[in-house]
Amino acid sequence: MKTTIKEIFQEEGYSIPNYQRDYAWKDKNFRDLWEDLEEAIGYNKKGYEHFIGTMVVAKNEDNKKLYDIIDGQQRTTTIFMLLHVLANEQNEKDKQETRKYLYQKGELKLEVAPQNQSFFKTLLEAAEKENISHCEKDADTEGKQNLFEVLKAILDKVSKLSEEEVNECLEALLKMVLMRFEEPDPGRAIRTFQSVNDRGVPLLLLDKLKSLLIYYSNTFCDGKRGLDQFINDHFGEIFKIFAKIKKSDHISSVGGPKFDEGDIFRYHAGSQRFDGIEFLGHYKTSTDNIYEKLKAELKKIKSTKSTLESFIQSYVSDLKNFYQAFLDLLSEIDTNPTTLKVMLINKINPLFFNSLIRLKINNELDAETLKLFAKTDIVFFKATRDRKSAAYNLINAYLEKGKKGLKSEMIAQCRNDIELAFWQSVNNASNSSCFHYVFFEKNCQEMGFADLKKLIPGKQFSQEKEHIIPIDLLKQRLYNKIRDLGFEDEKDLEAYINTYGNLISLEKPLNSKGKDKDLYEKDEIYKSSEIPFNRHFNVKGFNKKVLIERNNEMEKWLINTFFKDFVAH
């Protein structure tokens, strides 16, 4: 039925049910609402109504005086905050009148998600003093961060209004029209939520997943007795964990530039089997398809309450542990040199994450195992063809035979391609994506962790491959200089110029500075490097003989040290 904002808040109180998504609006969404309000002021002066959308509600089962907001919570929450800030700018008499729409017996008429309610109340109290900056430190989830950001934008807009303009905005806001629908069936209410989006903010994967599980808990497991709360509490933790993951300086390097919460959900789907349910994931399966597969599995077991309840508890608990273990591994980059080198310098392929994070959950991911993953990654992806299936399916060996079985499987899978890995690491080093990791493992073992961290000035590892004998020597065909370095001719130099022997890992600014400089000029540049190996490198005495010796040393080191486990088998 058609109603107004004034009528919405005149009598009833509202709550956000626990299956709802977190508050998702941002500054941009509020600006859209503000434009609606400016239009409404114009319509109001002409005596016209201004329609702003729909609202779907259902009676709260625990408190019949409250309505759960099924659709429209983002807009309703934002309008509530805007009303609160506008009221604060009124004279005392008018303020008391407006506060009737906001408070009932001293309590807010809007109860946001339980995990946000205390923060929401504190935020509004701080807004009355027109300073909310101290609240930002407590915004430990994305939902709280969004509440803070939008309220800050509201305060900024309202602070520029005169008292007359404030009253004009309030009058227009309270007269805004929407269609309010009431859903009588709580089970159908959850279904309704799953099928709608609110003002251009699509449901995120975790929002959909949480509501799906609460629907099955509520409908088939008497979830009100505890399982609903179990899901809600665990997802509250998952949202907090994911907010920290998104803030990590290293997530774009580890997860990729398009990383989102669905990626971790996908890694998890291929990391564990549950009773009667095989892996939900496959290395080719998208996030959406895994979600659909989970829905199909829930449908299959819904008729057996104990099985469904047991699965939901196990799945939700394990999912939270997986997100936490992912965050722990990410955080270790700042405290552990092995983790830094494997995750940032080598940038291990995410197809290993199902096994890697499962080991982390079980406290079995030590430095030796992490290095073995890095070497397997080099063989599978960086030195040979892409072996996506082999990487993803390593989890089978771990779940069936434990850590020892996993290591044996990794070694067995790498054996046939090890010679190609040798060749790429030495003879095609310039085109090898594992060059920096191999260089650091061979030449920089004595570097302290603090010195390693200096090589990451921003969020990305920014070392570059430096050609000691510059490529420009070939382009310019400086035959005398080529022969002075011990090469017979241009073709002889071309055969060696991109091999490991002619490369070092150098900081990006130094590499730019040394581009196409001669060896004597490079000597001073190398001495400015944070890497001891580079500072002590005898570039003035470099020639073909030294280059070949470096190649031979690297080949021996790869066989006898770096890849010795693979070679021995």
Image (cartoon, rainbow, N blue to C red):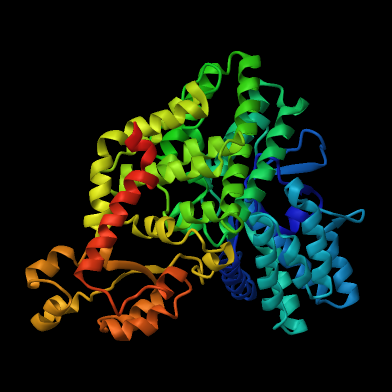
Q: Is residue 335 above or below residue 90?
A: above
The answer to which of 476 and 556 lies nearer the viewer is 556
Q: Position of residue 529 (x, y in %)?
A: 44, 76
Pick the front one: 260 or 562 = 562
Picture layout, residue 23 above or below residue 477? above
Say which residue appears at 77% left-offset and 58% top-offset: 120
Considering every residue shown, the one lying at the far right of the view is 105
Percent across and percent down for residue 2 are: 64, 51
Q: Position of residue 272 (x, y in %)?
A: 52, 28
Q: On the rendered structure, is 457 left or right of 156? A: left
In screen coordinates, is 525 left or right of 422? right
Residue at point 64% right, 21% down? Answer: 310
* Residue most extreme to the top: 304
Residue 493: image location, x then y, percent: 13, 69
Q: Within the image, what quadrant is residue 87 found in?
A: bottom right
Q: Quadrant of residue 419?
A: top left
Q: Quadrant of residue 216?
A: top right
| Residue 242 in view (yes/no) | yes
Q: Looking at the image, which is closer to me, 501 or 30?
A: 501
Image quarter of the C terminus:
top left
What residue is drawn where x is 33% and y is 82%?
A: 522
